[in-house]
Image: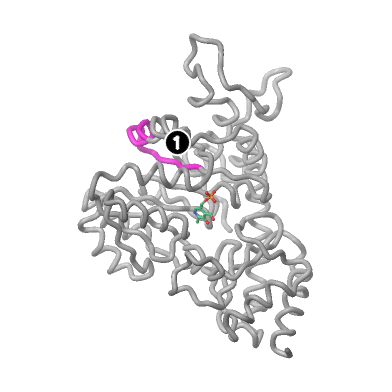
């Protein structure tokens, strides 16, 4: 990780932004951090008026994440609420180009919109930049997820942005896996960046939250209006927890990434592991078990420390066989296990995993 470049519009580097952005002014008796404001309505005559249009706790979170991404941020009830609100930008019959291995919830939204005759969708292999660039020709919106969940494929974001903008299409990047500390799509001219803040940003497996950020004021206004109109707004307590989590994102990610890199090195030598997929950064690793689905299912039930659970990005290490979900595409190997590497001691993580993997080879 190299959090050394100043983030977005802030004069500070990302670690400092994560700790300081969105905090109340340094004035006597102000709290150091934004308190939880539980309010459904406000005294009339101000800018907000009603709890669906704004909340000081949301604003603090939006300021912090917006500064990290280098744009203006909007928080949502979940990542998928943000995804739905963005996809609603696409006009009738507009073409959306998206990765075939994007998060299956996002792909399911596309499939649903297509089945109802709202949009057209074209799924592409994001590692084939030439094919993605070609698909941009007729697109209204290009959806990128990089790295993809769970295949961990990486897109050439600047090349796709250039092609999409030539065609007059918006580019959206789901930055959930990389976080703004490892990748800043808006600095690469993407139009919107979207997050499942449920994951690394909140970071403690206790919150559902989504967010987007954009540098385009007009887009921001349209998306805010739509969020507020649809009521896809975040819970205040969830937003407060996510902001608290964001304050330590850089420290958590640095440790989780270091653990992931060490595990990748060790997993590569284990005979039960046929393939290790890791883009070189971040804390998500996918392994393909040499003996397929059954071995993968056995593995997820044999460990003591690693928890068999979906989702990712928490302080605790979790894993799951992705094809246990019927909605996962057939191009994801049956024996693929996605590991979300946490911040525990790496030797404990390895011992637990290695013991279970050894069992598979011996059993
Ligand atoms: C890459 C990615 N995007 C979006 C989502 C959806 O976010 P949420 O679960 O917060 O609705 C997820 C959830 O797993 C995800 O992994």
Residue 225 belongs to the span the image colors magenta: no
Identity of the residue drawn at 46% across and 60% down: 104
Q: Residue 223: x, y in percent?
A: 39, 36
Q: Residue 197: x, y in percent?
A: 56, 46
Please tell me which residue lies in front, 18 or 39.
39
Tell me which corner region of the image, top left, top right, bottom left or bottom right, holds residue 234.
top right
Q: Does residue 141 lie above or below 259 as drawn?
A: above
Q: Residue 360: x, y in percent?
A: 70, 85
Tell me which corner region of the image, top left, top right, bottom left or bottom right, holds residue 43.
top right
Identity of the residue drawn at 67% across and 53% down: 252
Numbered range of the magenta stretch: 211-222
Residue 220 belongs to the span the image colors magenta: yes
Horizontally, residue 167 falls left or right of residue 263, namely: left
Q: Does residue 170 lie above or below 149 as drawn?
A: above
Q: Residue 47: x, y in percent?
A: 47, 16
Q: Does residue 18 lie above or below 184 as drawn?
A: above
Please tell me which residue lies in front, 254 or 242.
242
Tell me which corner region of the image, top left, top right, bottom left or bottom right, holds residue 26.
top right
Residue pointed to by mark 1? 72
Viewport quadrant of the N terminus: bottom right
Please tell me which residue lies in front, 285 or 117.
117
User: Under 8 Å from ligand 1: the CB of mark 1?
Assistant: no
Viewport quadrant of the C terminus: bottom right
- Furthest-top residue in this view: 45
- Furthest-front residue in this view: 116
Looking at the rendered structure, the secondary structure element under dot 1 is: strand
Identity of the residue drawn at 58% across and 64% down: 284
């Amino acid at each position: 990780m190299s959090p050394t470049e100043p983030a977005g519009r802030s004069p500070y580097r990302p670690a400092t932004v994560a700790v300081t952005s969105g905090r109340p002014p340094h004035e006597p008796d102000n709290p150091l951090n934004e308190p939880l404001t539980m309010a459904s309505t406000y005294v009339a005559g101000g800018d907000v008026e009603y709890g669906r249009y704004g909340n000081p706790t949301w604003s603090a979170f939006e300021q912090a994440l917006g500064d990290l991404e280098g744009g203006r941020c909007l928080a949502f009830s979940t990542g998928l609420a943000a995804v739905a609100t963005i996809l609603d930008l696409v006009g009738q019959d507009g073409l959306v180009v998206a990765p075939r291995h994007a998060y299956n919830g996002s792909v399911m939204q596309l499939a649903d919109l297509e089945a109802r005759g709202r949009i057209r969708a074209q799924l592409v292999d994001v590692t084939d930049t030439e094919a993605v660039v070609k698909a941009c020709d007729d697109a209204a919106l290009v959806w990128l997820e990089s790295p993809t969940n769970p295949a961990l494929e990486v897109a050439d974001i600047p090349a796709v942005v250039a092609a999409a903008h030539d065609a007059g299409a918006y580019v959206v990047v789901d930055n959930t896996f990389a976080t703004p500390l490892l990748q800043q799509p808006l600095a690469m001219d993407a139009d919107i960046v979207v997050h499942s803040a449920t994951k690394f940003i909140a970071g403690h497996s206790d919150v559902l939250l989504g967010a987007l950020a954009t540098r385009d004021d007009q887009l921001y206004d349209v998306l805010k209006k739509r969020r507020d109109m649809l009521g896809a707004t975040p819970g205040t307590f969830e937003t407060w927890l996510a902001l608290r989590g964001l304050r330590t994102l850089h420290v958590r990610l640095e440790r989780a990434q270091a653990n992931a890199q060490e595990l990748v090195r060790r997993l590569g030598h284990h005979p039960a592991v046929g393939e290790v997929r890791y883009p070189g950064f971040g804390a998500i690793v996918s392994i393909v078990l040499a003996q397929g689905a059954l071995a993968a299912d056995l593995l997820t039930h044999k460990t003591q420390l690693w928890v068999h659970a979906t989702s990712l990005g928490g302080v605790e290490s979790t894993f799951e066989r992705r094809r246990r979900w019927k909605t996962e595409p057939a191009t994801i190997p049956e024996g693929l296990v996605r590991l979300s590497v946490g911040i525990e001691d790496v030797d404990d993580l390895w011992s637990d995993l290695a013991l279970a993997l050894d069992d598979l080879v011996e059993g």
